[in-house]
Amino acid sequence: MRAVFFLLLLTNIIFVLVQWLYPYQPRLKKPRMQAAVNTLQLLNETPAGYSQAEADASLSDQGSEAGAALPARLCYTLGPFKKQQDAQEVALMFKQNKIDISSRSSLEKEYMGMMVYIDEHENREAAIKTAESLAEKGVQDYIIVNEPGRSNILSLGVFGLKKNALRRQKRIAKLGHEVKTEARYRNRTIYWLDYSESENEDLTRFIDQLKKEKGVSRISRQCSE
């Protein structure tokens, strides 16, 4: 037993000496360094892994995004002006502030109201006879109207509110007449002012005043150019 003990002790001493003289160095693989160099790609070259059509579409999308970033220029319209003189005075105000402005006109229909009337008279005498019959029943407001394609119409008034026109129609119908209603319009010329530059503070206050006094509005729109 003593021999075995000395043999184990000698073995351990030899192992310690070997470790001290020749230390263990693990052999680790060094990572392979990749050069961080981006490949220069010409505009007419197709990227790897893409077809030519896909590359063209990619460039097109990039161009669209760049174009979308640019804000569209806005233009403005002032109006409508019922009188040409009012439009001219406003245009002069802009020109005095060195802002280019142009004027234009358009023909539109203006709502006049609802007309209450009796038609289908063969001649003027028949229309007068109907008017005299109504006068005997207390109806005094009427006029005989002749229009292109329609003649001898007995108008019983034009009302701005539809409910008033219907009230008048109902009252005359009770007297034994066939009464009709019709919306009336007239053509009128209105005026507009167009410009593209933003106004200064004085002109902004001036436009706000126009909105209150003349019902003029400033309308934003895309420029036609």
Image: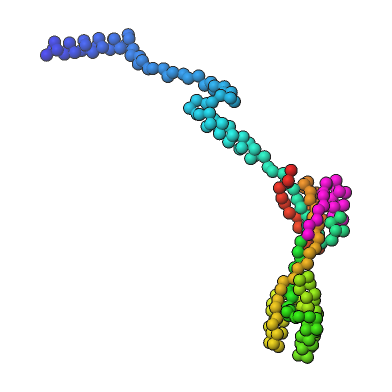
Q: Position of residue 225 (x, y in %)?
A: 74, 43
Is residue 153 or residue 166 the one in the foreground?
153
The answer to whether one can see residue 193 in this image is yes
Task: Examine the image and state in which quarter residue 169 appears.
Answer: bottom right
**Point 21% across, 11% down: residue:** 11
Q: Quadrant of the N terminus?
A: top left
Compared to residue 197, the image places residue 81 above or below, namely below
Q: Is residue 67 left or right of residue 203?
A: left
Q: Position of residue 44 (x, y in %)?
A: 58, 25
Compared to residue 197, the image places residue 9 above or below, namely above
Q: Position of residue 223 (x, y in %)?
A: 73, 46
**Point 33% across, 12% down: residue:** 23
The image's colouring method is rainbow
**Point 50% across, 29% down: residue:** 50
Q: Magenta stretch containing residue 95, yes or no?
A: yes
Q: Magenta stretch containing residue 112, yes or no?
A: no
Q: Position of residue 49 (x, y in %)?
A: 48, 27
**Residue found at the very far bottom of the displayed protein:** 136
Is residue 137 or residue 122 the one in the foreground?
122
- In this rendering, the count of numbered labels is 0
Is residue 131 or residue 59 the one in the foreground?
131
Task: Examine the image and state in which quarter residue 83 appears.
Answer: bottom right
The answer to whether one can see residue 157 in this image is no
**Residue found at the very far left of the displayed protein:** 1
Compared to residue 35, the image places residue 180 above or below, namely below
Magenta residues span 89-107
Task: Examine the image and state in which quarter residue 184 appears.
Answer: bottom right
**Point 53% across, 28% down: residue:** 52
